[in-house]
Image (tube, helix red, strand yellow):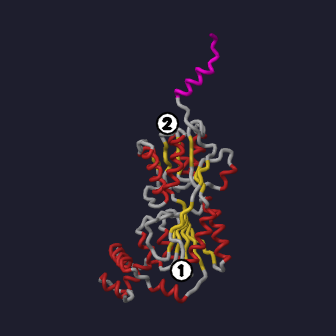
Amino acid sequence: MKRVTIKDIASMCGVSVSTVSRAINNGGEISNATKQKILKTIDDLGYVPNQNARNLKITKTKTIAVLIKGITNPFFTPMLKVLEEEITKAGYTFALQKVEEHLSEIDIAYKVVKNLKPEGIIFLGGYFVEDRKKLNSLGIPFTMTTIINKDLKIKKSACLGVDDFVQSKKIVNYLISIGHKKIAFIAPRIEDQSIGKLRLMGYQKALEENEIEFDEKLIFYPKKGTNPYSMEHGYEVGKKIVKKNIPCTAIFAISDVVAMGAIKAIDDFGKKVPQDYSVAGFDGLEINKYLLKPITTIVQPASEIAYESVKDLFKIIKKKPYEKIMEFDAELFVGKTTAPIVSKELEWKKQVFYYPFKV
């Protein structure tokens, strides 16, 4: 089959070669409609831009770029340590690139490829709300770490992480098993199409399987400008639940950090965890074991995921067989922030049983 060239793309789109180049490199003045038409044609034909191809063929930079969205999230701390150790141990340069909350990780990846010319990219976190076909034109191997996308059909790529849908369902099922039916969910951004969406779906599925009606009013998204994985988000929701007396007995937070914020708010506004509200998180932060009240959570094997992510990426770079999708199990840790609901009937029976009356 004849190799597709930039001239072929230009001809099919009815534009000049320079316009195609600007669309690929996000440069110059070009309408969004034209840009999207060019990128779609590139994706459909599987064309790899020459600039990236030259980078791969000519320049061996021995650099691995790690793109992280949520650099302040302590969940990523042990992962970054492992990534840096394993990348440098292999004789490569570890290049860390922060992705701001409001920016696209894919757009930043394009810039990193253009400027650093890395031999591979590791994505840590991110929403990937854009058309994932854009990842095709990166032209270099990459791994999505902590994100499982079973529909990803891009060459030279891999996904590693836990199944967020399954694990979310697991922790909500636990809350239901100890009597909770009104469970609030502190969610990430509504446009989050990766981890956040899967955890919300797991929450919904657990309710459905237990014949509990889903209540949209118990889903709390972050305010505009608020980091969805921050203590601030958890605190604001916890405060709202207490002050407005929102009818729920348990709270499932998108992460442990968010759960910490909710717990602080509940305490600040005169209620107690777990007596008044049970609170559960997700991630299994190292700090959890040192808290006075360890959070009930899903413990992800963060260091193991990071280690396997580097191994998988180097296999792709060296054109060796690798695992396209690597799924890890996670552990449900029951801490001191959740407790069974004691029914009013049971409370009444206890009062009658222990009432010091005389016959």
Residue that sits furthest to the front in the current view: 321
SS under mark 1 = helix
Task: Using the rendered view, name the quadrant where residue 61 is placed.
Answer: bottom right
Neighbor class of circle 1 (other Cα within 10 Å; few <14, some 14-19, many 20+) is few
Q: Is residue 335 left or right of residue 206?
A: right
* Residue 234 appears anywhere in the view: yes
Image spot of residue 354 (x, y percent): 63, 21
Residue that sits furthest to the top in the current view: 359
Amino acid type at circle 2 is Asn
Q: Which residue is mark 2?
A: 245
| First in sequence: mark 1 vs mark 2 | 1
Image spot of residue 120 (x, y percent): 55, 77
Magenta highlight on residue 351 = yes
Amino acid type at circle 1 is Asn
Cβ–Cβ under 8 Å for marks 1 and 2: no
Task: Using the rendered view, name the quadrant where residue 276 is placed.
Answer: top right
Q: Is residue 129 left or right of residue 177?
A: left
Residue 115 is marked as: 1
Disc 1 to disc 2, C-alpha distance: 52 Å
SS under mark 2 = loop
Residue interval drawn in magenta: 344-359
